[in-house]
Image: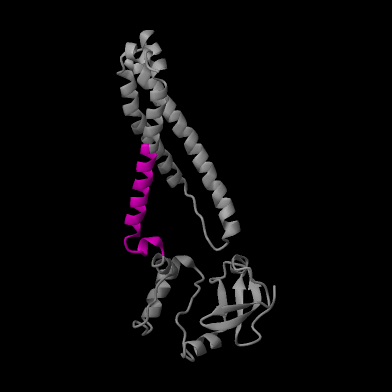
Amino acid sequence: SGGPFEHPYDVLIDDLHARNNKLKVGDSMQLLAHTFRVCGIVEHGKGARVFISLDTMQNLLESPGKATLFYIKVDNPSRTQEVVDRIKNMGLQSYSVITIKDYLSQITTAAIPALDVFIDAMIFIACAIGFIVIYLSMYTTITERTREIGILKSLGASKLFIVNAILRESLLLCVLGIFLGIGLSFLAKHFIPVLLPTLSVVITFPWVIKSALLALLAGVLGGFYPSLRAASQDPIAALSYE
């Protein structure tokens, strides 16, 4: 909606930025310590979310006739590196000439110092919490079923039978939790962009598999000791448990 620049302090924004900030054509917005008028709204995916005229930007930066960077589109993407080498050989060695792939790699999460360590720490904490929750849940369940376990043992149930029954219950709870968690994740992926249009949410299949395996591992470890403890109970003491 709207149209192109008509005045020096006009600004174009994309539809996601407009929706996220509740802006429409004719509204004012603060940018670079100046007040701009929204003259138009464009479709997202055009390289930026906010656009102002080149002359206005040069005047604000006190750099008339200069530009920070240029984008060059090649006809054949497979020859991108060849174009980069040709530009450098034209006497422009003092300028930074890189491909868009290399440029984007500088602004990814991998380029942020210690971010990978932070993510790994959060994953470890989440796994530890999951293990503790499952362990406490199974421990409480076994304590509440002490009498039932005593009845099973008095009827001849082996330790392996009791351990197997408890571990199967633990894994069943984990599987149900995995499907519920994955479902809620995809549901959140659908609703988060509605509330925050500029926030991108990506759920990759390898991470779904990793999280499912971690949950199953936590279920096995969390239910293993309580199952051994239950299998080691004395039948007479278990039958008299209140």
- Percent across and percent down for residue 174 are 44, 34
Q: How is the image coloured?
A: one colour
Is 152 or 1 nearer to us in this picture? Answer: 152
On the image, the x and y values in percent for residue 17 come to 58, 68
Picture layout, residue 40 above or below residue 202: below
Looking at the image, which residue sits at the far top? Answer: 155
Would you say residue 84 is visible in this rendering? yes
| Left or right of residue 208, residue 196 in this image | right
227 and 184: which is toward the camera? 227
Q: Is residue 21 above or below residue 93?
A: above
In the rendered image, residue 129 lying in the magenta stretch gets the answer: yes
Task: Report the number of numbered marks.
Answer: 0
> Does residue 121 appear to the left or right of 35 in the view shown?
left
Magenta part, dominant SS? helix
User: Who's the residue at 39% across and 76% down the image?
Assistant: 97
Which quarter of the figure is the C terminus placed in? top left
Q: Tell me the quarter of the picture where residue 99 sits.
A: bottom left
> Image height check: is 129 above or below 68?
above
Q: Which residues are magenta?
A: 108-132
Where's residue 2, x and y in %? Answer: 69, 76
Left or right: residue 81 versus residue 186 is left
Q: Is residue 156 visible?
A: no
The spot of residue 205 in percent (x, y) is 47, 46
Q: Is residue 206 magenta?
A: no
Q: Please give the name of the residue rendered at 34% of the width and 82% of the height, measured from the top-left corner.
A: 93
